[in-house]
């Protein structure tokens, strides 16, 4: 049987993620690292049909296939500089998960927390462990199959060799004092924030102990410093409307 030659495909966006990350900075480096980080998969009008989720309740995890929408470009390079290696070493693009690829496609494994079949915006899926910026287009959703997708003896190449040590996270005195800017920070998101910060959200090529870093999360700007293995949150500021 001859396979029809396909050089280009028109791929539809089936859903978008709703997450607490309006920017790329601060997003987890891989999916599944942050168990307390919740997001919602919201379907596009054409695919907002509960029948499309029939049978999904029997699965615990999903594969999300999505678009690096902030890195769409017409050209590509055979080598890239993985941030995990400090941005100074070039490796083959197909040996990395860099967002700068011939096709800006990505995949993430997430845990299903709730399948929402009723209520505003239904159907939708609440998941944990997503590493997607708010509004990221999702082009397909597939169930995770433990018997086929889990490979315990797999090796992780250079990514295993440069895994960062988790940081100890603390909040500076007064950050959550009554009447402070951080007093309105959602209590249910604090565990996810601590989990996120412990993974050291700084770029691998920026490791200054004196610098105050900042990123936006859950409608607040999180400001922090890192000294050795200790990260201190120095301020949590509400974003201006």
Image: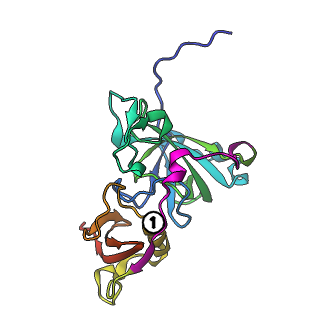
- Asked if 41 appears above or below 193 in the picture, the reply is above
Magenta-colored stretch includes residue 98: no
Q: Position of residue 167 (x, y in %)?
A: 45, 70
Residue appearing at x 55%, y 45% in the figure = 157
Residue 111 seen by the camera: yes
Magenta-colored stretch includes residue 157: yes
Q: Position of residue 194 (x, y in %)?
A: 46, 72
Residue 114 seen by the camera: no
Give the residue number, with chain letter if any, for mark 1: 196
Q: Nearer the viewer, residue 41 or 162?
A: 162
Judged from the image, the secondary structure of the residue bearing numbered disc 1 is helix
Q: Nearer the viewer, residue 214 or 156?
A: 156
Q: Position of residue 215 (x, y in %)?
A: 32, 63
The range drawn in magenta is 148-170
Residue appearing at x 54%, y 58% in the figure = 129
Q: Position of residue 142 (x, y in %)?
A: 62, 42
Quick one: quadrant of the N terminus? top right
Quick one: quadrant of the C terminus? bottom left
Residue appearing at x 49%, y 67% in the figure = 166
Q: Check the image and tell me how it is coloured.
A: rainbow
Residue 232 position by quadrant = bottom left
Q: Is residue 184 left or right of residue 145?
A: left
Q: Is residue 12 left or right of residue 71?
A: right
- Asked if 178 appears above or below 222 in the picture, the reply is below
Q: Nearer the viewer, residue 149 or 7?
A: 149
- Asked if 80 appears above or below 78 in the picture, the reply is below
Residue with the most extreme bottom position: 178
Q: Residues within 10 Å of mark 1 (few under 14, many from 20)?
A: many
Task: Report the label total.
Answer: 1
Residue with the most extreme top position: 2
């Amino acid at each position: 049987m001859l396979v029809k030659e396909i050089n280009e495909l028109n791929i539809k966006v089936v859903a978008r993620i709703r997450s607490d990350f309006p920017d790329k900075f601060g997003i987890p480096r891989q999916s599944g690292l942050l168990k307390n980080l919740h997001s919602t998969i919201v379907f596009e009008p054409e695919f907002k049909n509960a029948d499309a989720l029939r049978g999904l309740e029997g699965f615990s995890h999903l594969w999300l296939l999505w678009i690096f929408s902030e890195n769409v470009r017409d050209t590509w390079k055979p080598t890239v500089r993985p941030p995990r290696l400090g941005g100074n070493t070039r490796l083959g693009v197909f040996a990395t998960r860099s967002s700068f690829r011939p096709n800006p496609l990505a995949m993430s494994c997430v845990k299903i927390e709730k399948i929402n079949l009723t209520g505003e915006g239904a159907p939708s899926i609440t998941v944990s462990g997503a590493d997607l910026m708010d509004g990221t287009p999702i082009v397909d959703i597939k169930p995770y199959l433990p018997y086929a997708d889990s490979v315990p003896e797999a090796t992780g190449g250079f990514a295993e060799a440069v895994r960062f040590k988790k940081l100890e996270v603390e909040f500076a005195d007064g950050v959550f004092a009554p009447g402070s800017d951080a007093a309105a920070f959602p209590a249910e998101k604090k565990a996810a924030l601590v989990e996120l910060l412990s993974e050291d959200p700084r770029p691998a090529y920026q490791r200054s102990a004196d610098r105050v870093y900042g990123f936006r999360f859950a409608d607040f700007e999180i400001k922090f410093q890192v000294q050795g293995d200790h990260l201190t949150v120095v301020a949590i500021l509400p974003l201006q409307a």
